[in-house]
Amino acid sequence: MEREQEENQKQLKELTLSLCRSNEQESDVRTFIREIRQYATIQELDKGILNRLISRLLCKLQFLQCV
């Protein structure tokens, strides 16, 4: 019975951690969408806008690789 309780607590911790990660990812996606919306009405990409977009995408990719 004690062993079962320990296993349940371990599983609860793992599920809680998984939920936290999912919430963080959802938050990151929402932030990205909010940021990218400002570029939705652009008629023409200039060098500055393109560089900002690439920079943000690269930062996100590096962050995701670390997680």
Image (cartoon, rainbow, N blue to C red):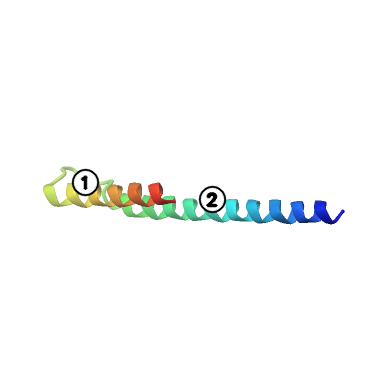
Q: Indicate the position of residue 13 as horizontal and vertical percent values.
A: 66, 56
Specify which label sits upstream in the sequence, 1 or 2. 2
Name the residue rendered at 31%, 50% in the picture.
36
44 or 6: nearer the viewer: 6
On screen, residue 24 versus residue 11, left or right, reads left
Label 1 sits on what residue type? Ile
On screen, residue 63 versus residue 54, left or right, reads right
48 or 12: nearer the viewer: 12
Q: Residue furthest right?
A: 1
Q: Residue furthest front?
A: 3
Q: Residue furthest top?
A: 44
Label 2 sits on what residue type? Ser
Q: Indicate the position of residue 51 as horizontal and vertical percent values.
A: 18, 49
Considering the numbered disc 1 on the image, is that residue within a helix, a strand or a loop? loop
Distance, label 1 to label 2, CA atoms, is 31 Å
* Number of marks in the rendered image: 2
Name the residue rendered at 73%, 56% in the picture.
9
Q: Indicate the position of residue 39 as horizontal and vertical percent values.
A: 26, 49
| Disc ID at residue 22 | 2
Q: Indicate the position of residue 64 as horizontal and vertical percent values.
A: 40, 48
Mark 1 highlights which residue?
42
Q: Residue furthest left?
A: 47
Name the residue rendered at 18%, 43% in the picture.
43
Name the residue rendered at 18%, 47% in the picture.
50
Q: Residues within 10 Å of mark 2 (few under 14, many from 20)?
A: few
